[in-house]
Structure formats: C-alpha cells, structure tokens
Image: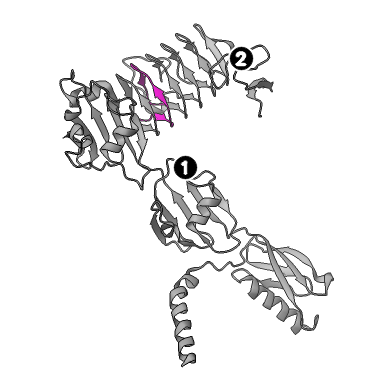
Amino acid sequence: MKLAIAILLLCTVHAAFGQSERSAARLTIGPGDLLSVEVFDVPELKQEVRVSDTGETTLALVGKLSLAGRTVEEAEHEIATQLETRKFVVHPQVAVLVREYATQGLYINGEVRKPGVYAVLGPHTLLQLIAEAGGLTEAASPQITVRHADKAEENIRLRPGDASSGDVVLRPGDTVVVPRAGIAYIVGDVARSGGYVMQDAGELTIAQLVALGGGLLPTAKAGNAKLVRKTAQGRQEVEVNVKDILRGRAPDLALHADDILFIPNSAWRSAANRLQNITHVMNGARIGAHCNVGDHTFVETGVVLGDNVTVKNGVAVWDGVTAENNVFIGPNVVFTNDRNPRAAIRKTKDQFLPTLLREGATLGANVTAVCGITVGRYAFAAAGAVLTHDVPDYALVMGNPARVAGYVCECGNKLNDQLLCACGLKYARQNGFIVRVPF
C-alpha cells in the first residue's frame, strides 16, 4: 500500500513539473565560447581553449574535438573518454567550466532601463530578465514579445500584481522586445494638455485621462466633448458627455492608443472645427509622454517630441525638428527647415535641413531657430534671439545673431564667473566645453 502511494506521488510530481523541465533551457557549448578544462591531480592538463567557428577545439594530448552543441557534462565525459581510451590518464576526472558564453545570451531591447545582452548561467524567466535589465520604463507596454531561438514567437501580457504572467522560461538565444505603450491625448479646457502613457495594463479610460490632465477648468463645456479616433476608414469624431461620465451617470469609456479627447469651453462654437485651431498634429508626428502642447500650435509630419516637452501657444513645428526630453519651446517661437526658400521652387523632403534641440534646452518667446543647427543640452536662448549657428551645452545666448552671453545651470539660473550655481551644482571647462561636475 505504501509503495503504491509513493508511486502515485511520484507520478503527480512528474506530471506537474515535467512540462516545466522539458521547456527549461539546456545550456550548450557554442562557437566562440571560452572553456577552462582541468583534470584532477594532473595540473599539466589545465588549459583554456576557445571553440572555433566550426565548433571544434584543440586540447593537449587529445587533439581536435567537436564540442559545439554539447552540454558541459557531455563535454567532460567526451574528454575523459578520449584521455582514458588513449591511455594518457587512468580514470580521469575532468571538469569543464565555460568562462565566456559567446552565443548563449538573452537579448532584451525596447522600454527597459538597461537594454542589451545578458549572459545565461542557468534557466531564466521573463521577469528575472526584466529585473536584470533594471525593470520597465514608465512608457513600457504590458504586451511583450518573446522571439525564441527556434524562430517561434510568443506574446506575453504582464498583468499588475500577477507574477505568474511573467513566469515564462527563456532559452539561450531568445530575444525579448518590450514595445512602447500607447499614448492617449487630452487637449482643450483642462489644466494640463498633453499625451499620457496607457500604463495600467495598457488600458486607460476617459475619467482617468481627465485626472491625468489635472482635471477640467471651470469654463469647460464637458457635456460636448469630442473623442477623435484614427480608424482604418480614417479619422472619426464621437461626441462624449464627459460631465456625465465624471458624475457616474454614464459608463466610463476605454480609450485606444492615439485617441484625442477634446474638451471645449462654453465659448467655442464647434469642438470639431476648434480642434484644428487648438492643436493640429499631423499623421507621422511622434509626441512623447507628458507633453504640454498649447493653443494654436501645428505639429507637422516627421516631427519628434520627446517626453515632458512643452510647446507654448502660437508655434508651428515643422518637419525635421527633433526635441529631446524636457525641452521648453516658448510662445511664438519660429522654426525653419529651408535656408533659401522660393515659392516657385518645390523641394523634396531630403533637401530640408534638420534642427535638433538637445535635452533640457529652452527657447524663449519669439526666438527664431534657423534650420540646420543643434541647440545643446540645457542651453538657454533668451527671448527674441535669432539662432543661426549651433548653441553649446549650458550656453546662454541672446541677440541677433545670437551670441554667448554666459552659461546657465540645469535649474535655469545663470552661473557665476567660477561656474557655480546658487542651487549648489558645479560646472567646469573641459576640452573647450562646459560640463557638470559630478557630486
């Protein structure tokens, strides 16, 4: 009876864990791997060898052996067999250690803190690899793609609070892709217009979007809001009673990626027409998370705005302009993308000159940025400046044409002659450039 129970328990354990064991990664030796080989009590045979592109390696006394595709245990057995068969060592005890894996890494890219290749020293799950990569960024989508080394593809949806959703065993050579989450936009009579990442399992409702936008302003006409959605048939507009949704009188609607919720105020005649006057974002423009886009702005196809970018009222951002994270573009800033325009001469897109605004840069009101320049990190262009050449990092420029008039801190305050800021940050000259001194 006891024997029968023991057999039953063993069968149960095997059924529960057999599938997991079969799917677990078996680390094998591959081309380019660096092996350390030792034979117990025979120090003369200690050696480090590299596996060739053909999968072979050359060992002292043994000669060439094909080890690619074998596990460490199989390699140890093969080397021991060769040493004993050729009567070099009696009952050899061989130990093989893989010092470097050249082809057995796990690859992860996309919205993680530290994308790259990670060495595999044992079976890994998806959550373990994400943890090694520093975790997901705020803009990460919960829908993750795993491309296995055998070309099979698996789509995984991470669910908040459910660790089992990431309990997927990864095999050597697998690639994990974490895409950027969808972004929903809210514009109009709210405290903070802009785009917000759909973080909560890739889902976001109208009420949540209004809350992220800081809530409605007192003049908002929330009963006549417009939801603008891109579909296969083109752009569609649906009237939404946000007032009833916030009061619980109407069901809260789920948003799709790239949806635009427009909140009019009581003075506007038509939400659909006024939307074009408030913010016109063309297809193909890329706007990051938590951006603040003001009234009467135009964002052309090909524009790239990073995260937390502010574009104040009355700005036209033309194709070729790229603004990295935390850039401030003041009211009525003028961009160009053609240095010698003629109405009668039509130019192609590749003839336009790009403009790059590096992280943290500020363009004050009425600045003109002539195309083909780069505004450096945390540089500050004073109101009315005309930028005709590259602006160095941390430089304060003013005038027409703009000239360097000093340097500013990342906090926005002007540095003194010793390149010190009242906030406590310090800077120094290095190879002709201003750099921040680490703490």
**Magenta highlight on residue 116:** no
In this rendering, would 216 be left or right of 138? Answer: left
Work out how far the residue at label 2 is from the one at label 1, CA to CA, in angstroms. Answer: 33 Å
Give the residue at the far top of this rendering. Answer: 400
**Badge 1, how many Cα within 10 Å: few under 14, some, many 20+?**
some
Q: Which residues are magenta?
A: 301-320
As drawn, the label of residue 137 is 1
Instruction: Give the x, y percent position of residue 414.
Output: 57, 13
In this rendering, would 427 be left or right of 353? Answer: right
Give the residue at the far bottom of this rendering. Answer: 1
Locate the C terminus and report the quarter of the image it occupies. Answer: top right
Amino acid type at image mark 1? Thr
Q: Tags 2 and 1 in contact by the CB under 8 Å rule? A: no
Query: Which residue lies at the image location 20% right of the left edge and 30% below the top edge?
Result: 225
Residue that numbered label 2 is attached to:
415
Instruction: Give the x, y percent position of residue 339.
Output: 43, 16
Query: Which residue lies at the image location 64% right of the left edge and 75% below the top edge?
Result: 74
Q: Nearer the viewer, residue 5 or 416?
A: 5
Q: Nearer the viewer, residue 168 or 84?
A: 168
Instruction: Give the x, y percent position of residue 83.
Output: 76, 79
Amino acid type at image mark 2? Leu
